Amino acid sequence: MMFNRVFHEIVNVLFLISCLFIVIPTLTILFIILYNWHNHFRSVSNLLMCNSCICLIFLVITYSIQTPSFIRQIYFDESQSSLLFCQISACLATFSTGIVAHSCLVQAIYRFCLLILSKHKNLLTFRTNSIIILISWLINLLIAVGMFISPFAYQYDPESHFCTLTTHYFPTSFSISILFVFVTALTLIILYGIILYQTINQFDLNSRSRNRRNQKLFHYIIFTVSLHVLGGIPYIICLLMNRFGRAPASLYSIEVLSLTFTSAIHSIFLFGVNRQVRQILFRKRNQVSSHPMNIRKTIQPLPVIS
């Protein structure tokens, strides 16, 4: 019993730390882009960046609303929240997980249209990409709400003290794994694979700059797909172990942590790849550090000679 409490305390701390690493980069990106929107920041790529940031912030909110209940159960041994609150929280968490996963897919579709279907200018407009974002949100909303068809889908997991789309019920959890992990990862591989193949064959292989560009694209593909798959692996392992036996209790908490940790890495990655945001931030930092108020010298009075 004592070990379980210590384990869940560690999980709670790691969860809060990962949420912090999600919120800080995403809010920084959003603030800088929106503040400078009419100053060379109005672009489709920044629109998609804002969508990814909003999805990640929404993920933090939907998982964090269960934190008070989690803390009460660990430290005060209180009972779980009401069934309605539990199911709504789990539905929102499933919805936020889906839009985060598919935000990567939305960016991949834009890159595919930009590099492969560049002749079709209507695919590169704000209107088209805004519609794609809206469709992505609506599809994930329908998927999350559609899980209510089964009364066993959204449950309280006593092992993790979280309300989730439980892996104890195979049909719904397997469906979500297919939609959010396998189909999304396969689509990312296909889209980025076509982009990489086209860029390699289109440009001169002896060009150093082109080779560098292809290498960066390849690394981007590997990172995006790997991060997406890693976030879902603990859930899939837990699902399969429950199908053929019983998963260890600690795996349920790791299942939640894997989502927030990979999302935190994703947030930091988004900040790193947006050169405009970094330039603005570093420029502001240099202006503050070089401000006259920050470099004033304190003049010591001369000693009086008697």
Image: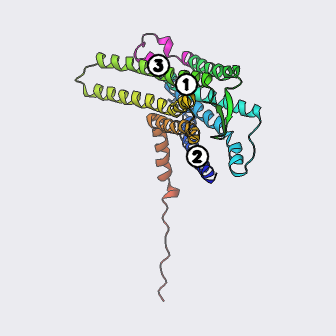
Residue under label 3: 187
Q: Which mark is residue 177?
A: 1
The secondary structure type at the circle numbered 3 is helix
Q: CA distance from mark 3 to mark 2?
A: 32 Å
Circle 3 crowding by C-alpha within 10 Å: few under 14, some 14–19, many from 20: some
Q: What amino acid is found at the position of numbered circle 1 in the picture?
A: Ser
Percent position of residue 236, x then y: 53, 29
Q: Is residue 301 above or below residue 59?
A: below
Q: Which mark is residue 11?
A: 2
Q: Is residue 283 above or below residue 305?
A: above
Write the start and end of the magenta stretch as one range.
111-129
Viewer-nearest residue: 253 or 45: 253
Q: What amino acid is found at the position of numbered circle 2 in the picture?
A: Val
Percent position of residue 291, x then y: 50, 53
The secondary structure type at the circle numbered 2 is helix
* Mark 2 touches mark 1? (CB < 8 Å): no
